[in-house]
Amino acid sequence: LKWCRADPFCASSGSMASETTELQSQRGKHGDLSELIDRMETLAESKLYAQLTDCIVEYVNQPSVSASQDDIYKLFDNFVKKFANMMNPTKFVHLLSRATLQMAKMQGAEPALEYATGFTEQLKSNAPASILLRSLRAALLLEAGKLQESRDVLDSVEKELDTAYGMDSVAYSRYYEVDRLYYKKTSDMTKFCRSSLMYLKYTPIAEIPESERGTTAFEIVAAALLSEEEYNFGELLDYEVVKASAGSPQGWILDLLNAFNEGRLDLFDEAITKHAAAIQGSKELVSSVDSLRRKMALLALMELAFQKPQNERNLSFGEIQIHCRLADHTEVERAVMRAMSLGLMRGKMDQVDGTFSVNWIRPRVLDKGRLEILKSRIDQWASGAQVLLSKLEEMTPELLVS
């Protein structure tokens, strides 16, 4: 009897009619998806709840349904929530998230927050689902402008994830998705960038709606370029969502990203000129071209030192000024001091002789070109070691005699 009461298609004919009515309503709005809706109805009547859940997820991911004003919310409220006890809990919370985010746009974040909170008791026994629900609460609190409350919820989720063992990756994905939105809201580009990279680590590109991939990649790349602490761009270039953005309207920013990764001011200037109109239309970048150029000069300095063998890294101010396109030696001194203060390079600056002796450069992701440089150096070292070995072998008889 207990099982029967939990099953909406076992409770009463009126309950069945309620679900059927909602599916008919959905069919009227999305006639091109009738096959999916028919399958949902058949799976629900057959009590094949695992397949039903996947079918519903597929349906709400359809562009026309995702773009609708309230179709996901109505489907959830009138159909999906009746199957809460039979569905995979994490997928159920995923559907709840999609529904409440639509609800927040229609009715405001507060009613949506209250609606989502109503499922807390039902989901508390499942750790991943509970974390997903709390992350959803943090997102809705953020939407409501309650930043501190949102941060408190996120901090509690982070502590639980730090000590969790074998937690579903979707829990990490959702946490970092909301965490990055928090830092976007507070305009902390460095933390937004780092949290976004963690989000990408746990989120397959298939889980990011195709319509959002270009914008997501643009926001992350722009944050990395603007961050005062981010100087390693090779990892960012390897993410699928960034690669996929090449053909999107926001794909132009990849030219800037490549320039930063290469540490080449010529590529930077070329990108700035080529995409001047797009930069003017970007609220993130339009007022930051000068700061981007200063950051670019530091990357050029790092690249200049990297390209030289370790015993030739005594750079003159004149060489740095020309390579990094700085106005004078005063600007060179500032760039060198900035690079050392950020931990990008270590060395000794001699202001009298006008030199900077580099003895360490912060490691970065190596692309094919930089790997070729390292290979060449290893080959030179091996050749030198072979010459030394030959000389030692020639000297061995003399050493034995003496």
Image (cartoon, rainbow, N blue to C red):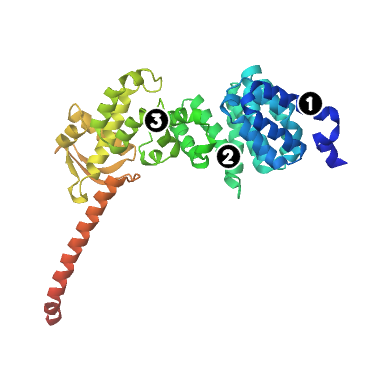
Disc 1 from disc 2: Cα separation = 40 Å
Measured as percent of width and height from the top left, residue 327 is found at 19, 26
Q: Residue at x 55, y 38 (%)?
A: 173
Q: Residue at x 73, y 29 (%)?
A: 79
Depth order, front residue of 348/220: 220
For the question of whether residue 88 can be seen, the reply is: no
Depth order, front residue of 3/256: 3
Measured as percent of width and height from the top left, residue 75 is found at 69, 27
Residue annotated with mark 3: 247
Q: Nearer the viewer, mark 2 or mark 3?
A: 3
- Residue 220 appears left or right of 38: left
Residue 377 figure quarter: bottom left
Q: Tell me which label, 2 or 3, sits earlier in the chain.
A: 2
Q: Amino acid at mark 3?
A: Gly
Residue 39 figure quarter: top right
Q: Are marks 1 and 2 in contact (CB under 8 Å)?
A: no
In the displayed orientation, state which residue is furthest to the right.
1
Quadrant the N terminus occupies: top right
Residue annotated with mark 2: 158
Residue annotated with mark 1: 18
Dot 3 lies on which element? Answer: helix
Q: Nearer the viewer, mark 1 or mark 2?
A: 1
- Residue 260 appears left or right of 64: left
Q: Which mark is residue 283?
A: none
Q: Residue at x 18, y 30 (%)?
A: 329
For the question of whether residue 156 can be seen, the reply is: yes
Measured as percent of width and height from the top left, residue 193 is found at 44, 33
Measured as percent of width and height from the top left, residue 56 is found at 66, 34
Q: Residues within 10 Å of mark 3 (few under 14, many from 20)?
A: few
Q: Residues within 10 Å of mark 1 (few under 14, many from 20)?
A: some
Dot 1 lies on which element? Answer: helix
